[in-house]
Image (spheres, rainbow, N blue to C red):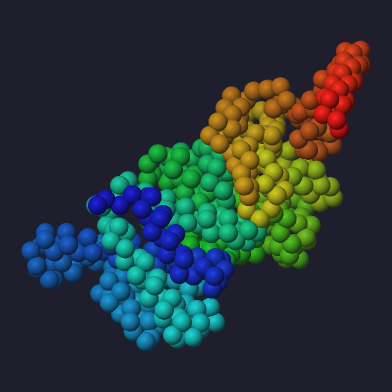
Amino acid sequence: MKTTQEIINNVVWKACDTFRGTMDSSQYKDYILSMLFVKYLSDFYKEKLEQISAKYDGDTERIKRALEREKFVLDNSCTFEYLLRNKEADNLGEIINKALAKIEEDNLTKLEGIFRNVDFNNRQVLGDTKERNAILRNLLEDFSDTRLDLRPSNLIGSDIIGNSYEYLISHFASDAGKKGGEFFTPSEVSTLLAKLVAAKEGDRIYDPTCGSGSLLIKAAKEVGNNNFAIYGQERNGQTQALCRMNMYLHEINDAKIGWGDTIGNPLHLENNHLMRFDVIVANPPFSLDKWGADNAANDPFHRFTNYAVPPKSKGDYAFVIHMIQSLNENGRMGVVLPHGVLFRGSSEGKIRQKLIDDNLLDAVIGLPSNLFFGTGIPACILVFKKNRKNNDVLFIDASNDFDKGKNQNNLNEVQIRKILDTYRSWQELEKYSHIATLAEIQENEYNLNIPRYVDTFEEEEQIDLEATKTNIAKLELDISEIKAKMSYYLKELGL
């Protein structure tokens, strides 16, 4: 039976039952997603081994050389089948950890550190030996479901494992509430951002706060082929590992995903300067406090030299400035930010004025509230471009266009298309969009609060007082007649 995305989703989501009730999903997600990655590596390698063995008719030396040229190398002691055979071992957690370490060791240039944040022998998280072994045995048995055949030739669609991985991450993010927003941007927002910046063939694409990589993957898909380069950085080690796995599962095998604090220690450099990119997408942490303001004056890359230093307790513009400085001469970027960046004063006001005067701001798009995991506040998308041909700014108020969900709101395809069509055609729509001149923005003292530019006020319908009085009089007469009839019927009944 061929493996579909629905099968992968159902089998793996059911495997979560092994952990539910014993620990939070923010903890067990790493065990589930790591095991899915191991199963993928194992099935991928098993099929390659079969194909190469058949091709070289059992010639051990030629088979070995051919396997070494493959994307991944897997020793027999770290395949999923090996782990399954050892499911009754008293030291099962230790066996799994050794297998993961061996996978990293044998694929050092690609997979070094990818399992660093998951410990299958962790007593504090998984319990004492007996309890831990039972959990891990159940996990292996769940993943041994015969329907979960991840050999490339058995998959319906080239991207279904990656899509299933995204499905799982989104569910974990939903469960995790506020923490979920730290590693996942809702799919429809990622899609919108990716289409706004429209990466092209040959582009370098970058996300300085890449989380689990969904934004980068969506941006890359816009290219339409594999002629692009992916760069990202993530300060949370667990999330950076998830991102790297996510890239491989989407067949993006040469993504460069760094681990570290982008503002304090940017890792993507060329000749000791910030690397420049064609396209940048990001959903940075909203109003991050303690982002490193004390070190901004001594920044070795001089990112803040031409700008005011953002407030210590709000790092939104620190990420914006870093991204602007990382754009090449024709680069474009889209970033999700809280509405406060549009109107807050002091140093943020100065930064905003500088960005506008330098003709970098292209569009301001207001999004509905409650779109993001863990926060109900409305957000906006700012689109920036280098080498702009005019100095107008397009304002779009899409805050009222959404589908209401149980826990959070969603954007549907029609709503996304409306935003994109308005942006691409650069048009004004009543109560939806407005093209503001530089003079208009200056008149508003560089305040970008969307209601200053897009009037969405709906006048209440005029009330006809005379008609209302007539209706009230008629209702009162009707009530009087009904009361008289009720009184008559009650008298007849002797009540």
Q: Is residue 178 left or right of residue 493?
A: left
Q: Nearer the viewer, residue 176 or 130?
A: 130
Residue 153 percent coordinates (x, y):
24, 52
State the residue at coordinates (67%, 40%): 367
Give the total number of marks visible in the rendering: 0
In this rendering, does residue 309 appear at all?
Answer: no
Residue 445 in picture, x, y percent from top left: 84, 37
The residue at the point 90 percent across, 13 percent down is 470
- Residue 490 is situated, as x and y percent measured from the top left of the image, at 84, 28
Quarter of the image holding residue 32? bottom left
- Say if 213 sits above or below 66 in the image: above
Above/below status of 439 relative to 108: above
Vertical placement of 476 versus 405: above or below?
above
Q: Residue furthest left?
A: 57
Residue 10's place in the image compared with 126, above or below, is above
Provide residue 418's location: percent of width, then percent of height.
59, 29
Q: Is residue 45 visible?
A: yes
User: Which quarter shows the C terminus?
Assistant: top right
Determine whether, in the image, residue 99 is placed left or right of residue 218.
Answer: left
- On the image, which quarter does residue 364 sit in? top right
Residue 479 located left or right of residue 139: right
Query: Where, by quadrant of the figure, is residue 138 drawn?
Result: bottom left
Rendered residue at 79%/49% (across/down)? 348
Q: Residue at x 65, y 64 (%)?
A: 264
